[in-house]
Image: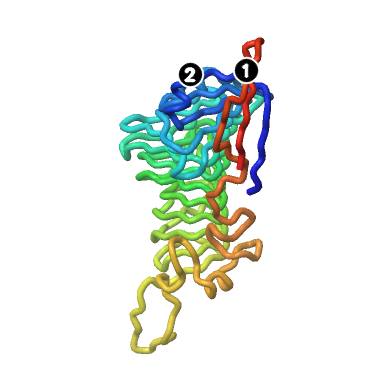
Amino acid sequence: MKKLFLSLIAAIAFGAGAMAQESRVATLQHGTNLRAYYGPNALVEAHNGAVDGDVITLSADEFNKCDITKAITIRGAGINKTVINCGDNSITFTIPHGSAYSLKLEGLSVNISEIYSVKFNGTDGTEMVVISKCQFGGYSIAFTKCNAVVVQSFLGGRNGAEAGANSNVTCVNSILKGMIYSGTGKFDVQNCVIIQSPNVKYSSIKNSIIYAVTSLGDTNTTSNCLVKEGSSGFADSWYVKTTYEPGPWDEDPAPVLWGELFSGTYRLTEDAAATYLGTDGTQVGIYGGMYPYDTTPDYPLVNRLDVIGSHNDGKLNVKINVE
């Protein structure tokens, strides 16, 4: 991407020694004002100074865990480049009730032990969470009393995603370790890969690939999914054999087998991609649909921030290198 150079007056909080020694930076943007924080606790400090609607941009590196309680945007340098390190702790994202803004996470990973969870909490189900090009681990990624949109992301952990009480979770072109529900939680899934057998009700699964043999309840709606033989409950979908065991009157000497459909991790072969098509005419799975899977951030990344002068009013002239 073409490099852009911006020179602006911004309110910056840092120590010169810290800036020289520490590459980790969280840049807090409020309107046209910027404030930079350095070190492993930079995200914590930037969050403390933020208000709803602000944007925090994180450099590539690890940042200490911070429970988020504001409707802000947090952007990283990409999956596995910017990491929020929770260690042996859960992390909670709480969307303030009545805020005019959504909570947005873009281009980062959350590193967490498998026995702890990532939690997104609203108040009455009207609060909004938008997750793009992110990766999460942990025991589960739980959404409670909120609406969530997940695009081009990986929801891993032991159970994958959980739609809790009064939550609607929309997943598009994403990889889900699993899907579970509680209370009135439901999913709308399109062009996804689901690794474990989903346990859901009143949900929609379309144009997706399910890697585990699954019996889906009749309260769900499905179409154009690629599933393994032995599964049930998938309307207008393809049931593909996993092994070939010919009978005495072999009806098909060369059936299509599941293992022959994939050329790499979650990617269909050229023949399979042209054969198994979703409702929009593109291939099923994460490389079809409107947002083919790509975790590269689609917004400018700040890779350098230099102080080039000072002013008597206490503000600094800052030069930012963006690419």
Per the image, label 2 sits on a secondary structure element best described as: loop
Residue 148 falls in image quadrant = top right
Look at 68% across and 26% down and name the residue there: 8
Q: Mark 1 highlights which residue?
A: 310
Residue 151 seen in render: yes
Residue that sits furthest to the front in the current view = 309
Foreground label between 1 and 2: 1
Q: Mark 2 or mark 1, which is nearer the start of the sequence?
A: 2
Residue that sits furthest to the top in the current view = 313
Depicted 280 relative to depicted 132: above or below: below
Residue 126 falls in image quadrant = top right
- Disc 1 crowd rating (10 Å Cα; few below 14, some 14-19, many 20+) is few
Depicted 230 relative to depicted 33: above or below: below
**Residue type, mark 1 in image:** Ser
Q: Nearer the viewer, residue 32 or 254?
A: 32
Q: Could you tell me residue 83's position as x and y percent? A: 43, 37
Q: Could you tell me residue 266's position as x and y percent? A: 46, 61
- Side of 103 relative to 175 (left or right): right
Look at 31% across and 31% down and name the residue there: 88
Q: Could you tell me residue 26's position as x and y percent? A: 51, 28
Look at 60% across and 37% down and name the residue there: 321
Per the image, label 1 sits on a secondary structure element best described as: strand
Q: Nearer the viewer, residue 249 or 127?
A: 127
Label 1 to label 2: alpha-carbon separation: 14 Å
Look at 37% across and 39% down and name the residue there: 138
Marking on residue 15: 2
